């Protein structure tokens, strides 16, 4: 067409249109962006025109790679990352106002193509200057849009981003409000993650446990939710189903008839102390306690059956090792002595006792250890030497500190230090 000219790959433009393009676009470089790119003084001078021509030719060469480099430089230098208009400043105004003619559309197409790849915010209908196709194809959506498309709550998406199981971008607006955006490619992952999780109530139902016990398992790190009210005030809990499966146990058939008890019954009636429920669960993981039942049947934690006597002994041992006191009768069992013998030891002050919140005199691990380190019975000493207790009593040069002939107690006891010098 007469009066029109074209370069390979660019639309045909008239001479005035080329001059307009050179006059505006030629002012931009990676080191300088004009604040008001209006008319240029001394454009008729050769050095000014040459500079503009050189810069335009560099930007158009290998189109649009060099133009995208310019855009990336401007974006990195910008104070604002929340607004496209403010981020790209005068260049945005130049592309959509100063060179708004149809022949310059290739510039705007390259700009919007750059945003598609490198703008981490959202592009929506508020960007009225953009082509509708640009808005429709932009790969990032708001947090609410992502939640709606994935079929989950916005808080779920927010916490997936917070724990970095999906990638998200956060921009802080001048008002202080934070704007999140999600890549649409993450929507499937969000849906899969949410589908593979259960809420706190669902977890409690599947494990046959009260909700507060599920919270205890979470606090102890046995269950690790992807989304938790305890971390970030989420509106819901999301616990991976795979973690729940670890709390289903196969039974171990017992060779004898045993009295069994369920974990739910223990939780309801045994008055477990702080931390004892988590300790019980870890004992199941470590096979210190074995569920009683069919080996081919997986049972949820709350419904598994345990040997009642074995479990009570295990719990008593744990409490005692943790510093809890025991009764004098229980101390007699641990020492392998008759109850009346131990009551005599308490009466004589050889076995120290305390008073705590539980009824009666109580014995601690420390007092048991001290007694066993200090005293030994005649029967135990004779057994170690494979001698008769009566013969030893008559031949030993050491006098017992307690016994029938000394204080009327039922057994003779010696100081270890005197027998094992």
Image (cartoon, helix red, strand yellow):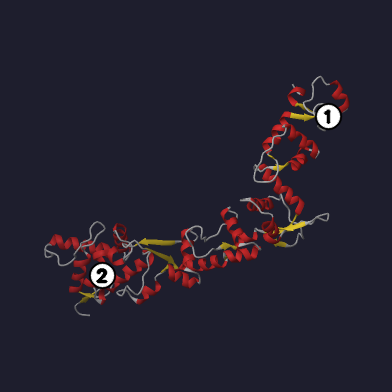
Q: Nearer the viewer, residue 411 or 267?
A: 411
Q: Which of the image's four quarters has the N terminus?
A: bottom left
Q: Secondary structure at mark 1?
A: loop
Q: Does the image show residue 300?
A: no
Image-based side of 42 in relation to 309, left or right: left
Q: Give the residue number, with chain letter if any, for mark 1.
A: 404
Give the percent coordinates (x, y) of residue 17.
20, 73
Crowding at label 2, few (<14), some or many (≥20) Cα neighbours within 10 Å? some
- Residue 106 has which mark? none
Give the percent coordinates (x, y) of residue 304.
71, 59
Q: Nearer the viewer, residue 183 or 350?
A: 350
- The earlier-in-sequence mark between 1 and 2 is 2
- Residue at 79%, 22% in the rendered image: 399
Q: Secondary structure at mark 2?
A: helix
The correct choice, above or below, for 394 with respect to 169 in the image is above
Q: Give the residue number, with chain letter if any, for mark 2.
A: 95
Image-based side of 237 in relation to 138, left or right: right
Image-based side of 307 in relation to 142, left or right: right
Q: Does the image show residue 254?
A: yes
């Amino acid at each position: 067409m007469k009066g029109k000219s074209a370069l390979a790959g660019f639309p045909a433009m008239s001479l005035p249109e080329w001059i307009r393009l050179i006059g505006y676009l030629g002012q931009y470089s990676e080191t300088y962006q004009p604040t008001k790119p209006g008319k240029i003084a001394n454009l008729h001078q050769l050095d000014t025109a040459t500079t503009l021509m050189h810069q335009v030719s560099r930007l158009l060469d290998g189109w649009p790679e060099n133009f995208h480099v310019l855009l990336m430089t401007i974006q990195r230098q910008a104070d604002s990352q929340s607004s496209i208009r403010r981020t790209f400043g005068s260049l945005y105004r130049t592309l959509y106002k100063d060179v708004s003619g149809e022949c310059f559309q290739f510039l705007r197409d390259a700009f919007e193509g750059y945003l598609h790849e490198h703008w981490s915010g959202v592009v929506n209908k508020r960007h009225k200057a953009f082509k509708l196709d640009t808005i429709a194809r932009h790969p990032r959506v708001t947090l609410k849009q992502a939640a709606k498309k994935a079929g989950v709550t916005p808080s779920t998406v927010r916490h997936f981003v917070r724990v970095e199981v999906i990638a998200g971008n956060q921009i802080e607006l001048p008002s202080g409000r934070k704007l999140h955006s999600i890549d649409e490619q993450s929507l499937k992952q969000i849906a899969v993650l949410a589908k593979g999780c259960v809420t706190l109530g669902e977890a409690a139902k599947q494990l046959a446990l009260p909700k507060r016990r599920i919270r205890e398992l979470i606090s102890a790190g046995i269950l690790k939710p992807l989304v938790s009210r305890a971390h970030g005030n989420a509106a819901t809990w999301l616990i991976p189903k795979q973690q729940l499966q670890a709390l289903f146990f196969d039974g171990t058939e017992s060779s004898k008839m045993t009295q069994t008890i369920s974990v739910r019954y223990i939780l309801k009636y045994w008055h477990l102390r702080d931390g004892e429920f988590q300790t019980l669960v870890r004992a199941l993981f470590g096979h210190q306690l074995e569920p009683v039942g069919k080996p081919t049947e997986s049972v949820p934690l709350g419904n598994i059956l345990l040997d009642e006597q074995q479990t009570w002994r295990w719990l008593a041992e744990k409490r005692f090792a943790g510093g809890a006191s025991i009764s004098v009768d229980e101390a007699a069992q641990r020492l392998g002595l008759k109850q009346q013998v131990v009551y005599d030891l308490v009466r004589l002050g050889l076995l120290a006792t305390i008073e705590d919140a539980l009824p009666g005199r109580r014995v601690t691990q420390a007092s048991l250890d001290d007694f066993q380190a200090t005293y030994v019975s005649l029967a135990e000493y004779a057994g170690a030497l494979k001698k008769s207790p009566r013969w030893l009593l008559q031949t030993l040069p050491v006098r017992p500190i307690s016994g029938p002939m000394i204080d009327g107690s039922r057994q003779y006891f010696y100081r270890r230090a005197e027998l094992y010098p």
